């Protein structure tokens, strides 16, 4: 741990806590200021005034706003995200039911996207000036611009409904019961269900690492040590991989760390197209039913991951690049 | 001579002046009489295309008789917030009543929608107040004699149509598709107002191929599987199957004994129920009359607030024999069988009694309690719940009407287009919910010999709700005129593409026994609307805008 100073870590941790507190406060007020009323989800001909009062009490909405806020912050410190209005279960429990699915989707998509992206970036840099390069860039830009639901629907129509190779939705076949999470992760059925949604997401994500890698490669290829390696007569492959790529790769790692944060809660489109039970859909449902605790809890979780991953990215960079002093001094 | 001309000119000028002044005053007076611009609320086109189109067409028609109307688009949550919690702040909104088995009895709609007691905070959100209607609604509620009650229900529909309580639109057609290579066609049962998606289909469906499971789709996530909580439409499909009830709504829409062998009215307020003696809980223990009594008493404790209105009328429940109970009601209630006996789930006392005791000291109630393995006595037992993904129920072979399929599986598929592909390739064998283009659905079904579509008139209906508290909709003639502008045949044909029938009552034509086909609802047409307005004294200004009748 040559570059890390523990004082720095402490300082960053303090900053992270402050950031999280600000985010939590903003979230608290945003939902309550938005038009919409949690009781609306319960309107029924037999929903009497008495029942409405009971519900308001249960939600804690009968208390003054400042009191609700203090209770909320107090609970947050204890790790208690509150109870979902809609599911009447602790927010943490509800989120944990879908979080693993989101993580599997996200990690597999990121791994595919970054693997293909990095190799693609190297390849395009290698083929600088040739027609293949232009074509490659156009295709990459296309993948980034194409709407995810459109790509998803096309993959679904072709590979699921036409060719019948993959199932069209869900995490497993109807009626399947896995005794443990491990059993699920070891079953082929699961991967068959995971493939199309992960592919759709990775098609969208690969643009960033690919173009980033290519751009870094092009920069690095002009550096003196690369020229030196070429002059020494090393093969193009060796120069590309051992000298250029290794260095061009650094920013991509940090991009991946940040990418994990982004990919956590924003996949509602893929989740809808492939009926994948994840955090994105849960979040949309929570917001539309004014389920404040669930919406807040989910957002806080996502924000927390993003803030943390940013921190991880910084640390990683300082570990990988000896030139970088973590506190920014040269 | 000159003097005469001067006098004549002066008189002419005076008259001209008076004439112009009068015109000016008339215009000023007209400004006061101008019917203000009204706003029509609708849900967005993307989520509710039929409502959006209906409101848009109505706004255009209103413009044709000089009523200035703007369309205001709001997502459902916001719309419900305004309409429900700010009852003076809107003019007209699109709305709908959905089909639920308990609505097979006309009481719920007849009373809750229009009785003045529910106008402030309850379901009479339009603010309709008519003492004559109140009397009819109250009387039908306590008239146990079916024929007499029917007359009252007919009368209530007449009053609402005459008064234009609602501006009616359509009863949609429920289109449900099933795979005829998986299920025998005669084992799929139709139910009044609900189509083939109903309890009787689930327990009677006979598998005729290797596929032994009933796999259907839902478009909303399951909130809870709790017999003391009315949580959502999909949730109610599940509770109906896992728990038994004293009676059930039959295919004809009328209550029939189920867990009971017989239900007899000893007098207007006393009901004797003889229970079956061959029922067991999914954990093996026998179902007793103690369990039944307990099930009806729990909501009275306040721990199951959603069910409380349905047991409030019960004064006392006596166990008079090994299998007999007597329900003593506080007063006669015609809908008791439907709204109470066919609605309450029979729950095991040995499991729930300690839970309810425990909850009495806590702020939360039974709605928050979610059992890991809910226990009922119904034709299906709980097997598995993958949150946000699917619910699996297993057939209860010991049940007196055991299902013929092995499992009942509800898959949560939010992607409507995908469900079309899934019913075709067999991933689903019953398309229970389809909110997309019905024409496309019909086309697909016609192309696929293994699919059958059954269309039935929905119990539920779509309508436009006028706010009776505020002008101009507070005026009956205005409402009748707008009702003439809301051409229901046009809506059924153009907006619903033929997959709906015009509606003229809150009681659907699917309920043949209760529906009144002969009500004085305004006829459609712009000329009709104009005539209605003219006869009531409305006029139009020089720009063609509508003016209230002169005082």
Image (cartoon, rainbow, N blue to C red):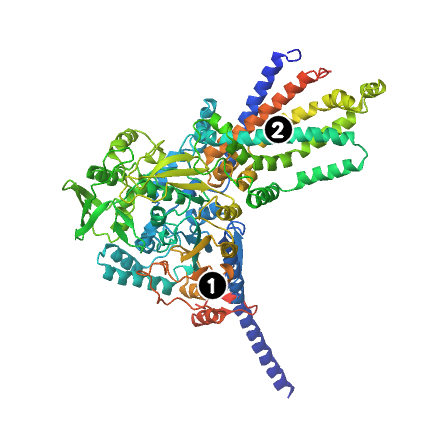
- Judged left or right of residue B77, residue A144 is right
Query: How would you rate the neighbour count of disc 2 (Cα within 10 Å): few for under 14, some for 14-19, many for 20 or more?
Result: some
Q: Are marks 2 and 1 on the same chain?
A: no
Residue A252, percent from left and from top: 68, 26
Chain of the residue where label 2 is placed in the rendered structure = A
**Vertical arrangement, residue B540 with respect to residue A317, above or below:** below
Give residue B486's mark. 1
Give the image quarter of residue B519: bottom left
Front position in the image: B528 or A288: A288
- Secondary structure beneath dot 1 equals loop
Q: Which residue is mark 2?
A: A111
Q: Quadrant of the N terminus of chain B?
A: bottom right
Farthest residue to the bottom: give it. Answer: B1
How much space separates mark 2 and mark 1, taking CA atoms?
57 Å
Residues at circles 2 and 1 in contact by the CB criterion of under 8 Å: no
Residue at left 49%, top 41%? A288
Front position in the image: A190 or A315: A190
Front position in the image: B448 or B177: B448
Front position in the image: B533 or B22: B533
Farthest residue to the left: give it. Answer: B320
Q: Quadrant of the C terminus of chain B?
A: bottom left
**Vertical arrangement, residue A199 with respect to residue B183, above or below:** above
Give the image quarter of residue B259: top left
Residue B411, percent from left and from top: 45, 41
Total numbered labels: 2
Q: Is residue B466 visible?
A: no
Q: Nearer the viewer, mark 2 or mark 1?
A: 2
Give residue B16's mark. none
Chain of the residue where label 1 is placed in the rendered structure = B
Residue B172, percent from left and from top: 43, 57
- Secondary structure beneath dot 2 equals helix
């Amino acid at each position: 741990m040559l570059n890390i100073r523990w004082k720095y870590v402490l300082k960053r941790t303090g900053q992270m806590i402050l950031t999280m507190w600000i985010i939590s406060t903003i979230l608290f007020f945003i939902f309550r200021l938005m038009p919409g009323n949690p009781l609306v989800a319960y309107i029924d001909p037999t929903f009497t005034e008495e029942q409405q009062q009971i519900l308001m009490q249960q939600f804690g909405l009968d208390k003054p706003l400042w009191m609700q806020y203090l209770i909320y912050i107090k609970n947050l410190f204890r790790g208690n995200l509150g109870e979902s209005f809609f599911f009447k279960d602790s927010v943490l429990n509800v989120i944990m039911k879908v979080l693993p699915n989101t993580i599997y989707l996200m990690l597999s998509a990121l791994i595919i996207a970054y693997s293909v992206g990095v190799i693609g970036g190297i390849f395009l840099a290698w083929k600088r000036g040739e027609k293949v390069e232009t074509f490659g860039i156009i295709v990459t830009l296309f993948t980034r611009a194409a709407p995810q639901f459109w790509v998803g629907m096309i993959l679904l129509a072709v590979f699921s409904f036409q060719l019948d190779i993959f199932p069209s939705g869900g995490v497993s076949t109807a009626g399947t019961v896995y005794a443990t999470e491990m059993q699920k992760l070891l079953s082929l059925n699961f991967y068959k269900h995971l493939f199309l949604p992960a592919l759709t997401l990775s098609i969208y994500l690969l643009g960033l690492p690919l173009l980033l890698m290519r751009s870094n490669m092009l920069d690095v290829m002009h550096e003196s040590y690369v020229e030196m390696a070429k002059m020494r007569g090393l093969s193009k492959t060796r120069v590309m991989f051992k000298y250029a790529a290794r260095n061009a790769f650094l920013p991509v790692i940090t991009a991946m760390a940040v990418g994990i944060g982004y990919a956590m809660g924003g996949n509602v489109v893929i989740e809808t197209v492939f009926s994948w039970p994840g955090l994105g859909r849960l979040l949309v449902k929570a917001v539309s039913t004014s389920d404040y605790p669930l919406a807040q809890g989910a957002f806080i979780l996502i924000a927390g991951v993003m803030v943390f991953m940013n921190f991880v990215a910084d640390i990683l960079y300082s570990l990988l690049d000896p030139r970088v002093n973590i506190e920014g001094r040269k | 001579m000159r003097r005469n001309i001067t006098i004549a000119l002066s008189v002419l000028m005076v008259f001209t002046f008076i004439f112009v002044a009068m015109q000016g005053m008339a215009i000023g007076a007209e400004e006061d009489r101008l019917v203000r611009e009204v706003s029509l609320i609708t849900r967005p086109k993307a989520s509710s295309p039929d409502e959006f189109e209906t409101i848009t067409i109505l706004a255009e028609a209103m413009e044709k008789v000089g009523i200035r109307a703007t369309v205001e688009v709001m997502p459902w949550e916001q719309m419900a917030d305004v309409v429900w919690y700010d009852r003076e702040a809107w003019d007209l909104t699109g709305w709908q009543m959905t089909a639920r088995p308990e609505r097979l009895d006309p009481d719920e709609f007849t009373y809750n929608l229009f009785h003045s007691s529910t106008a402030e905070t309850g379901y009479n959100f339009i603010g309709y107040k008519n003492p004559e209607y109140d009397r009819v609604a109250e009387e039908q509620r306590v008239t146990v004699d079916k024929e007499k009650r029917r007359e009252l229900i007919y009368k209530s529909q007449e009053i609402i149509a005459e008064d234009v309580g609602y501006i009616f639109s359509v009863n949609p057609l429920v289109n449900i598709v099933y795979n005829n290579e998986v299920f025998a066609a005669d084992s799929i049962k139709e139910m009044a107002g609900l189509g083939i998606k109903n309890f009787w289909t689930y327990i009677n469906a006979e598998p005729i191929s290797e596929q032994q499971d009933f796999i259907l789709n839902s478009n909303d996530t399951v909130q809870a599987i709790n017999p003391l909580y009315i949580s959502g439409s999909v949730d109610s499909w599940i509770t109906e199957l896992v728990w038994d009830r004293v009676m059930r709504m039959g295919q004809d829409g009328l209550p029939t004994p189920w867990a009971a062998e017989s239900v007899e009215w000893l007098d207007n307020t006393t009901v004797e129920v003889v229970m079956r003696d061959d029922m067991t809980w999914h954990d093996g223990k026998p179902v007793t009359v103690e369990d039944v009594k307990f099930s009806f008493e729990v909501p009275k404790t306040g721990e199951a607030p959603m069910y409380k209105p349905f047991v409030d009328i019960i004064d006392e429940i006596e166990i008079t024999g090994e299998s007999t109970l007597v329900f003593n009601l506080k007063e006669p209630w015609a809908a008791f069988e439907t709204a109470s006996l066919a609605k309450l789930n029979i729950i095991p006392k040995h499991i729930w009694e300690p839970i309810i005791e425990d909850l009495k000291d806590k702020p939360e109630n039974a709605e928050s309690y979610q059992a890991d393995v809910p226990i009922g006595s119904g034709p299906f037992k709980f097997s598995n719940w993958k949150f946000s993904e699917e619910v699996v129920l297993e057939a209860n072979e010991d049940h007196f009407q055991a299902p013929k399929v092995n499992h009942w599986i509800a898959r949560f598929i939010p992607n409507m287009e995908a469900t079309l592909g899934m019913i075709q390739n067999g991933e689903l064998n019953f398309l229970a919910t389809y909110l997309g283009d019905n024409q496309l659905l019909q086309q697909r079904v016609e192309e696929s010999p293994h699919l059958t579509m059954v269309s039935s008139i929905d119990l539920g209906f779509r309508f436009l709700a006028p706010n009776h508290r505020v002008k101009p909709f507070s005026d009956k003639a205005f409402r009748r005129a707008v009702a003439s502008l809301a051409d229901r045949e046009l809506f059924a044909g153009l907006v619903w593409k033929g997959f709906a029938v015009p509606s003229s009552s809150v009681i659907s034509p699917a309920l043949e026994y209760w529906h009144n086909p002969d009500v004085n609802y305004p006829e459609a047409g712009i000329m009709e609307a104009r005539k209605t307005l003219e006869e009531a004294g409305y006029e139009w200004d020089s720009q063609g805008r509508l003016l209230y009748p002169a005082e």
